[in-house]
Image (cartoon, rainbow, N blue to C red):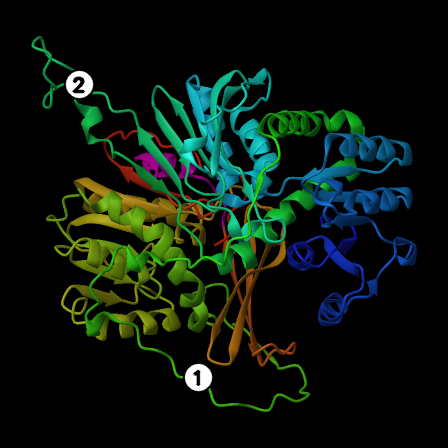
Amino acid sequence: MNGHPPLRVVVCGTNFGRFYAEAVLAHPGYTLAAILSRGSAASRAYARRLGVPHHTEVDQLPDDIDAACVVVGSSISAGEGTALAKALIGRGIHVLQEHPVHLDELTECLKLARRHRVQYRLNTHYPHVEPVHAFTQAARRLTGQQKPLFVDAATPVHLMQPMVDILGRALGSLRPWRFTDPLALPAEFGTQPFRLLQGVLGGVPLTLRVHHQLDPSDRDNHALHWHRVSLGTEGGVLTLADTHGPLLWSPRLHVNRDADRRFVLEGPGTDNLDLTTTSVIGGTETFREVFTELWPQAVGHALDGLREAMAEGEDVLRAAQYDLTVCRIWSDLAARLGPPQIIRPPAPRPLPAGELFPAPPAPAEAREPIPSPEPPTDTGSRPLPPSESSAGTEAAPPYTPSAEFFDLIATEHTAGASAPAVARALAGADLSHGPVLDIGAGTGLLTEAVARARPDAEILACEPATGMRAVLTSRVFSDPYLRPRVTITADAAPELELPDRVSAVLLCGVLGHLDAGQRRRLWERLLRRLSPKGVVIVELLGVERPLVLPEARMATARAGHHRYEWWFSGAPDHDDSATMRLHTTWRVYRDDEDIPLRVVHDSYRWIPFGLRQVAEESGLHARLLPTRPGAPPLAELTRQPVVASPVPSPRPVLP
């Protein structure tokens, strides 16, 4: 990573520790050196499956270990995690320890780490989960504009320490803080699952509801819900609906009154009435995706924080003052609440949303065909397959080698991020002046979404890459709803053939393929044809300057007996410092085998830049569209000024 050798990391514990191990394996800059556990058969088998040594004692670890992730309960959870952390620190190993950790133990570990000149970090984990990170970043932008008026939060008792951290990051401060004791309820009310505390945190009035029941042997499975937070200002309420998203923004309801105290619903001063009552920012994930993607990614961010501290060599005790305050506040809350009620309920029956909100089945012609599984093949030893890649020149359309895999990752992104945002942006657009022009339509996922959102739209879908266009054509021809309304061309920007008038233009994942001259030519031609109230929607990569993106596994998918892995990387182009060369690799495995059946490479040039440059080049007014946290930035451009939206998360976004 940036020329430095990867950190050799040992993971201690294989329960929640499995998420740490997966993070180390997937996150650039780290190598999983060993598993350390008590030595159960399951732990030994897990280490064998990962191909790493298994140890049961700290003294057995080799001398080249750089860092350790201690994912074993501390004494507050009747575990030996803190003793293990101390032993590792004594070996001169940097330590990242999973929460919860008592204030006294945290202080001891910090002092010991300072003495041995290593870094020690407490990982409350959940602030690094992407929807929570997006919430805290949006909260800081919100409180930078308006004074926070209240915080309303709810948490299970065993995740209360991370909740304090989340609130501190959202507010930008934990001090001053003070709380009242929870209200005592009469005995005739019976057992109540929640206890309520009032107080002040970071100087902001706080209401905290705690699910104060605990199954000691299975805490997560019997929490009634996870973190939920609402932060209010005079302008509205920002809400984290769940630890794993989505975010909600509810503008303040305010309507002017006339002299007779009646609502003024028309005329000047009624712009607020056009605000959406609640905007859903970001999508939601399945629990499987939480375990395979969100949690390992969160661990990766925590590891990066430890690595940065190691590189800077900062004073570990001074750097941990915020963590110490989090622990003090958590200890105060725990003391006021007292021991939680011990429960041992039966396993719950989670309900899918369909049981509460039944929807009519889709028409047969709109359903996706179910792929047939491929026939079994020899699963014995086989040599590595030859790599498949594009043999084209720089001018050859990108995406052709990997077109067959495109929908495996793009379908979810389109359905959960870009399609809802584009549909909202086009909902009030006047599409009577000409077609919607979809430049770089790909396999037609967004084309189809626009057609279904706007039944009155005629669409011109332009896609130069043969493989992508083949899927697009199949999608349109197989759907009677699309076939009369979508015209497909092989034209490429900027010299594509344009109709006399265009009502809207989609440029999603396209502009970075064009140099400055090509973009200027495209904008000149589009603006001559775009109707006066026309809309242009642009999706960018989220990288505004050339940088190194180490290869990382971005997604996995399954079909039949095959497992597909998508790997992505990028780096500045050797021949042009203002350009990046992006590389994507697909590996196809049979079931859980380690040797791929196929490896397909694709590579293309991308010129990174941001929305401000798009607005300057086009001469249009731009605003960001709300979409899922972590999704590529999406913007609406019009000839008339529009209300600005918050900027997206500063973390780089990959396509």
Farthest left residue in view: 260
The residue tagged 1 is 373
Residue positioned 77% across, 24% down in the render: 318
Residue positioned 35% across, 51% down in the render: 418
- Residue 13 lies in magenta, yes or no? no
Q: Earlier in the sequence, mark 2 or mark 1?
A: 2
Helix, strand or loop at disc 2? loop
Query: Identity of the amino acid at label 1?
Result: Pro
Q: Which residues are magenta?
A: 607-626
Q: Pinpoint residue 50: horizontal percent, then vertical percent.
A: 72, 68
Q: Is residue 208 visible?
A: yes
- Marks 2, 1: nearer the viewer: 1
Query: Identity of the amino acid at label 2?
Result: Gly
- Residue 608 lies in magenta, yes or no? yes
Farthest front residue in view: 188
| Whether residue 261 is situated above or below residue 285 in the rendered picture | above
Helix, strand or loop at disc 1? loop
- Marks 2 and 1, how far apart in space? 60 Å
Q: Nearer the viewer, residue 81 or 246?
A: 81
Q: Circle 1: is it few (<14), some (14-19), or many (20+) Cα within 10 Å? A: few
| Whether residue 472 is situated above or below residue 195 in the rendered picture | below
Q: Nearer the viewer, residue 477 or 283?
A: 283
In the picture, the disc for residue 320 is none
Residue positioned 81% across, 32% down in the render: 110
On the picture, is 579 further left or further right than 16?
Answer: left
Q: Circle 2: is it few (<14), some (14-19), or many (20+) Cα within 10 Å? A: few
Q: Pinpoint residue 264: horizontal percent, then vertical percent.
A: 11, 19
